[in-house]
């Protein structure tokens, strides 16, 4: 394993002021210099349609994401919660990714986190995403877990993390995730 682990962090939200993207940006700042985190967005991925796939194959925008996942030592996914579930855009992205040969999530260390306006902080959607990742043969870290509830009270208007307790816990989580990635499967 290299001295620095390279992580790709996927935000499950498309919106520019997303708390989930802000959570990943906070992780970039908090992580030790033994970990680099590159944030990937899902904007622009078309809705999966088997006819389109037959006609033109997996879209280049998905292939680009697949290559980032392949090149990374581990993946963090920050999921919002929409109606107690995974947002359609994130599920759609994993469906496209599942269509490439040599599944990029296969045996890849993955960490699931999330932020929501509600008090449960994506508990329900994270467990659905974990189930989805089983189908992709990912090696998802069980614990610790990150549920950032009441997100509007935890982030400042500029998107920076404004909650010391959350920052402290993110450091604990990142250390555990780095150990998970370095474990060598
Ligand atoms: C369609 C929709 C459904 C939502 N359902 C939930 C929900 O089930 N639980 C929850 O905590 N928040 C829910 N919310 C509020 C989101 O937590 C909030 O919009 C949050 O900011 C989304 O994440 P983002 O900031 O990363 O985009 C919902 C929002 C939308 C737009």
Image (cartoon, helix red, strand yellow):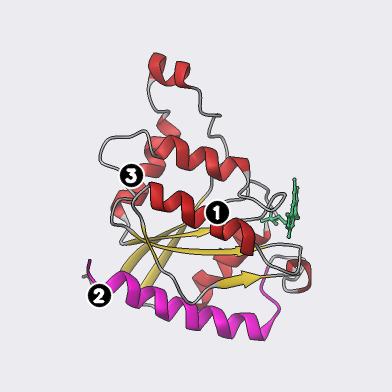
Q: Residues within 10 Å of mark 1 (few under 14, many from 20)?
A: some
The reply to whether callout 2 and callout 1 are in contact (CB within 8 Å) is no
Q: Which mark is residue 67?
A: 3
Label 2, secondary structure: give it.
loop
Identify the mark nearer the N-term, 2 or 1.
2
Q: How crowded is mark 2: few (under 14 residues within 10 Å), some or many (20 or more)?
A: few
Q: Residue at x 71, y 70 (%)?
A: 149
Q: Which x, y percent locates residue 185?
A: 22, 66
Give the Cα distance between marks 3 and 2: 21 Å
Identify the residue under disc 1: 128
Seen in the picture, residue 19 relative to 2 is either above or below; the reply is above
Horizontal placement of 162 versus 68: left or right?
right
Q: Can residue 31 be seen in this view?
A: no
Horizontal placement of 84 versus 46: left or right?
right
Q: Can residue 72 be seen in this view?
A: yes
Q: Which of marks 3 and 1 is in front?
A: 1
Give the Cα distance between marks 2 and 1: 33 Å
Give the residues in magenta: 160-185
Residue 120 on the magenta span: no
Q: Residue at x 69, y 81 (%)?
A: 163
Count every numbered label the image shows and give the total.
3
Q: Which x, y percent locates residue 144?
A: 49, 77
Seen in the picture, residue 59 relative to 41 is either above or below; the reply is above
Q: Which x, y percent locates residue 132?
A: 47, 49
Which of the two residues, 144 or 74, is positioned nearer the viewer here?
A: 144
Give the Cα distance between marks 3 and 1: 24 Å
Label 3, secondary structure: give it.
helix
Which of the two residues, 100 or 67, is positioned nearer the viewer here?
A: 100
Identify the residue under disc 2: 3
Q: Nearer the viewer, mark 2 or mark 1?
A: 1
Identify the mark nearer the N-term, 3 or 2.
2
């Amino acid at each position: 394993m290299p001295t620095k682990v390279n992580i790709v962090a996927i935000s499950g939200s498309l919106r520019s002021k997303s708390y989930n993207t802000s959570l990943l940006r906070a992780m970039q700042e908090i992580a030790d210099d033994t970990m680099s985190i590159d944030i990937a967005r899902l904007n622009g991925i078309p809705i999966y349609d088997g006819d389109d796939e037959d006609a033109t194959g997996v879209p280049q925008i998905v292939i680009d994401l697949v290559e980032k996942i392949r090149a990374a030592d581990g993946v963090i996914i920050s999921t919002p919660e929409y109606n107690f579930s995974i947002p359609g855009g994130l599920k759609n992205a994993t469906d496209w990714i599942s269509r490439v040969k040599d599944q990029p999530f296969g045996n890849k260390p993955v960490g699931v986190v999330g932020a929501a306006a509600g008090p449960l902080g994506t508990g329900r959607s994270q467990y659905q995403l974990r189930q989805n990742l089983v189908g992709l043969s990912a090696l998802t870290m069980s614990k610790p877990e990150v549920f950032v509830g009441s997100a509007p009270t935890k982030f400042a208007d500029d998107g920076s993390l404004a909650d010391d307790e959350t920052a402290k816990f993110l450091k604990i989580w990142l250390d555990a995730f780095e150990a998970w990635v370095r474990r060598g499967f």
